[in-house]
Image (tube, grey):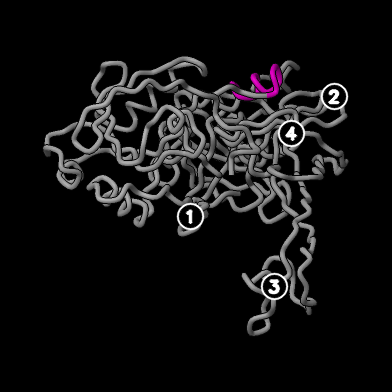
Amino acid sequence: MKSVSETTPTTSAPARRGSPAAWFVAGLAAAGLSFFAGHQFWPGGLSTTGAPPAATTLAPAGPAVAGQHGLPIGESTIADIASDAVKSVVNIDTRTSVAVPDFPFHFGLPFGGLDFFFGPGPQPFGDQPRKFEQQGTGSGVIIRPDGYILTNNHVIRRAQDIKVTLADRRMFKARVVGRDSFTDLALLKIDASNLPVARLGTSKGLRPGDWAIAIGSPLGLDHSVTLGIVSALGRSLGDGKSNVELIQTDAAINPGNSGGPLLNIHGEVIGINTAIRSDAQNIGFSIPVDVARQVADGLIAHGSVPRPYVGIYMQDLDPRMAKSLGLPESTKGVLVARVAPGSPAEQSGVAQGDVILRIEGKPVASAKDVRTFIRSRNPGSTVHLLLNRNGSLMALQVKIGEYPSESSDE
C-alpha cells in the first residue's frame, strides 16, 4: 500500500544564474514544490469476458434500515456481501533480490539503518555488494475466469517472483501481462480456469456517504473485510501529483490492501485500493473502477496503454509569484518548475523558469489547463507553446512523446 507521504525526492536541474526565474524556481525546489505537466511520475491507478456470478441476495436477517439507494440493510448484509466477494480476491506475495553495498558500522547499525529492513546481525566489512531478499505482499481481484488478475503496479513493481494465493488456498505462480505506471495498475495471469470473477460495477453516480467495503490482505492478514463509506470523490495525491481522480474512503485499508477491491452495498467493485495517508487514520484512496476497466482492456489487448507525455513539472502563477519573476501581477500563466531530463519538453528547448502563457493560441490559466490539453492529444502529435522567458516572449513547438515505461519511471 503506497503512503502519500512516502514520495521519492527529485533533484531539480541547476537554475540559470542571475535570473529572477532561477532564484524563484530554486525556492520552489527547496520547498518541495514539484509538479509534473499533466503526467506526473507517481509512485503510488476492465472488462470481463466471462459471465459474472449471480448477485448476492441481500435479505436482512433482522430489522432492516434504509440503505444506499433504498436497499434494505440487515444485520447479515455485509457478511453476505463479503462471503461472496472474497472468492474473487487473491493474496499476492512478491520476492525481489536487492544488492546493497557493504558499509561499515556506526553505533552498531550499518550505514543507512539497513538493519531495519533486513534484520539485525553482524555483517563483515568489504567492498562487494551483499544480496538480500526483499519480500512484499498485496492484494488482487480476479476479473476473468481464465486467470486474469488486476492489482496495483507498485505491488509487483520490480518483483522477480510473484505468487498468487486464491481464497481456496491454491497457489499459483503469476506472470505480468502488462502494467500502467500512469494509473498504478497492473494485470497478472495465472494458469487456472473456471475461477470466481468479481462483479465490476461503475464509479459513476457515487456520492460521499455511500457505503464502502474493502477486502484485502492488510499486513499479510489475507481476506480481511472492513466497512466504511465513500468520504469524498475526485481526490488527488500529494497536492495534485496524482494522474487519476481518486475515491476517498474511511473503510480501513493498510499496507497489503493495495490492489484489493472497494465494493458498494451491492457487492460490486467500485474501486481498486491504492494508497493511504500515513499521517492520518482511515484516509484511504481507490482508483475508480471505470478507469481500471479501461486500463485492463488495453493491457489485455496490447500489453500497454499509450499515454501522451511532455515532461514538465508546473506551478500555477499567482500575483506574488509573477511579481517575483519580474512580470506584471496580472500575468496569467503556468511556471515551469522543472523539466524532466531527456523529455520531449527538454528536447524542444523548454527550460526551468519559463512561464507558459498560451498553448495552441489559447490562454493558459492553470496547470490543469495544460494537463487537460496534453491528455487530449496522441503521442507523436505536436503542440505550440508561447512562453515568457526572462521577460521576452518565445514560441516553441513540442512533439508529444509517450509516457515513460516502467524501466524509466523511477
Q: CA distance from mark 4 to mark 3?
A: 45 Å
Mark 1–mark 2 distance (CA, rounded to whole Å)? 40 Å
**The quarter of the displayed image where residue 402 is located:** top right
Identify the mark nearer the N-term, 1 or 4. 1
Relative to 163, is 57 on the left or the right? left
Closest to the observer: 10 or 180? 10
Q: Which of these two is toward me, 162 or 349?
A: 349
Q: Which residue is mark 3?
A: 103
- Frontmost residue, 201 versus 359: 359
Is residue 302 visible in this depiction of the protein? Answer: yes
Q: Is residue 273 above or below residue 293?
A: below
Q: Amino acid at mark 3?
A: Phe
Q: Nearer the viewer, mark 4 or mark 3?
A: 3
**Is 385 displayed left or right of 62 in the figure?**
left
Point out the stretch of residues depicted in magenta.
Answer: 293-303
Element type at marker 2? loop
Q: What's the distance in space between the residues labelled 3 and 2, CA to CA?
A: 51 Å
Residue position marked by numbered label 4 in the rendering: 88
Question: Is tag 3's residue or tag 2's residue first in the polypeptide sequence?
Answer: 3
